[in-house]
Image (cartoon, rainbow, N blue to C red):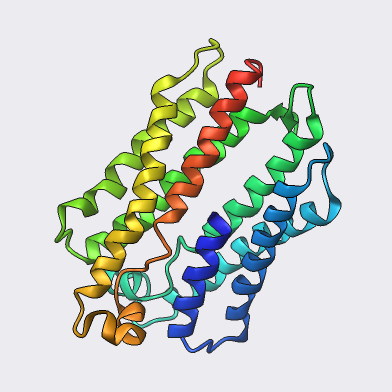
Amino acid sequence: MLAASVLADSSVEHYRGSFKNKAMYTPLLVSALTMATSLHGTADMRPFAHKARDATYLLAAATGLVGSGFHLYNVGKRVGGFSWQNLFYGAPLGAPMAILLSGLLGFCSERVRQAGRTRPRIFGLPAGRAIAAVAGAGLLGTTGEAGLLHFRGAYHNPFMLLPVTLPPIGAALLLSAAGDRSGRTHRVARWWMRLLTAMGLAGVGFHAYGVSRNMGGWRNWSQNILNGPPIPAPPSFAGLALAGLAALGLMRAHPDA
């Protein structure tokens, strides 16, 4: 879901930038490859990691890091540097982190698959807790990006407060679960992840409505999709929430994971 969100969002945003830098094609290709790799992994029932999938996920993570550098450079080179104006209308600083997270979570999934019936671990750490920590940190970062863009929109719709209030609570619940060794089931955290998943999917509808409110509505879709709220962005919340839900389920199945 994260890779699909990146593919759609970067396609629109980089098309708006006329692909001025040829490197702007990279996240489209890598996110499409990551999504295909994830689908392959979902269909593959063999209980061991796949080297090609691992390589793709690491490529996605590297693309996110490099993309963050490009976006920082894009904002910094503008007149005024890192001003509010440039943060609002320059390359979104947090966007490349979505593809990094998709690669990182995909790599983690391969480690869980490889563990089979034994206690899964990632870089020597309990897998469930590690994934919960990654998803929690990702929710905080995504909240920051949504908060900046919704602040630009002056929170004219009260529902715009949801992506900056609900996810930090979910992140806190996940990070708390990651550090908790009491063996609790974390029922509240599981229900909160479901709530965030619904919020991310509902956000697509809200953003589509935002596009329709621009002059010409959907009849002028080719212009309004570029200038309206990004329709593919909200599912990134859903993707991270589902990863958090999977981590909680893993900890439930393996209390020492």
Q: Going 36% across and 38% down the picture, which residue do you hit?
A: 195
For image coordinates 69% across by 61% down, the residue present is: 36
Q: Is residue 89 above or below residue 58?
A: below
The answer to whether residue 9 is left or right of residue 33 is left
At 50% from the left edge and 23% from the top edge, which residue is drawn? 177
What is the total number of numbered labels drawn onto the structure image? Answer: 0
Q: What x and y, as percent, mark residue 190?
A: 44, 28
- In the rendered view of the protein, which quadrant contains the N terminus? bottom right
- Residue 242 position, x and y percent, is 51, 41
Quadrant of the frame with the C terminus: top right
Q: Horizontal placement of 207 versus 58: left or right? A: left
- Of 69 and 243, nearer the camera is 243
Is residue 229 found left or right of 58 in the rendered image? left
Looking at the image, residue 131 sits to the left or right of residue 144; the answer is right
- Where 115 falls versus 155 (above or below)? above
Q: Is residue 3 above or below residue 77?
A: above
User: Is residue 96 in view?
Assistant: no
Instruction: Give the residue furthest to the top.
Output: 182
Please say whether residue 211 is visible from this viewpoint: yes
Q: Nearer the viewer, residue 190 or 84?
A: 190
> Residue 34: image x %, image y %?
67, 60
Residue placed most toward the observer, 45 or 55: 45
Residue 199 pos. (x, y %): 34, 47
Tell me what residue is drawn at x 51 percent, y 76 percent.
11
